[in-house]
Structure formats: C-alpha cells, structure tokens
Amino acid sequence: MKVKEDIKPISYLKSRAAELLAQINETHRPIIITQNGKPRAIIQDPETYEKMRDSLGLMKILAQGEKDVQKGNTINQESLFQKIEEKLMKKKHV
C-alpha cells in the first residue's frame, strides 16, 4: 500500500470521484477515506472485493474443517466413498 496515495480526505472524494475510481480500478489498491482526520470508509474495486470475499469464505471453511479434525469429527476415505456410492445407487434405482 502506498499510504500517501491511498488515504484521501472526504473532500477529495467529493471533488474528484471519477479520478479516484479510475485510480482504484487501475491499481486495485483500496482507498481509505478520512473525515476530520479519522478513517471512515474504504473504497475498493469490485474484482478485488470479490477475491477478498471468496478468500474469507474459504478461510471459514478451513477453520471449520480444522475444528472438526480437532474434535475427531472425521471419516476415513474408504468409508466416505462407500457412502457416496450407496447414495448414488439409491438415486439410480429411484
């Protein structure tokens, strides 16, 4: 992050919104908007936001998996495949 370039006061947003959006979409770096010298908002391009959201979703899944492993809530591969095959066979005969 280039701090000087990535922190802007709200007045800058008001007067140069199009320029700011162009910068965000070109650099893919978020911009911190300040009000009275304090950070109040972050503006981010949609592509980077989606990647971040997807990454957080994967991290949540991994954290849940880790909890399951710690609790011993697991199943071995052979048993899993057997259960899948049984379910597929049931659907095939329905």
Image (cartoon, grey):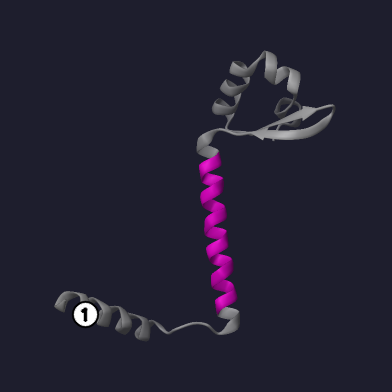
- Snapshot quadrant of residue 49: top right
Residue occupying the point 62% across, 33% down:
29
**Total numbered labels placed on residues in the image:** 1
- Snapshot quadrant of residue 69: bottom right
- Snapshot quadrant of residue 42: top right
Mark 1 neighbour class, 10 Å CA radius: few under 14, some 14 to 19, many 20 or more: few
Q: Is residue 12 above or below residue 42?
A: above
Q: Looking at the figure, which quarter contains the N terminus?
A: top right
82 left or right, relative to 17: left
Q: Main structural element of the magenta stretch: helix, strand or loop? A: helix
Question: Residue 72: x and y, percent?
Answer: 55, 85
Q: Is residue 25 above or below residue 69?
A: above
Q: Is residue 58 above or below residue 29?
A: below
46 left or right, relative to 12: left
What is the magenta range? Answer: 49-68
Residue occupying the point 26% across, 82% down:
86
Question: Residue 54: x and y, percent?
Answer: 51, 50
Report the residue that reaches farthest toward the top. 15
**Does the stretch in magenta take in 60?**
yes
Label 1: which residue? 90
Report the residue that reaches farthest toward the left. 93
Residue occupying the point 23% across, 76% down:
88
**Does the stretch in magenta take in 62?**
yes
Q: Looking at the figure, which quarter contains the C terminus?
A: bottom left
Question: Residue 80: x and y, percent?
Answer: 36, 81
* Callout 1: SS: helix
Report the amino acid beneath label 1: Lys
Question: Residue 74: x and y, percent?
Answer: 49, 82
Residue nearest the viewer, comparing 38 with 30 = 38
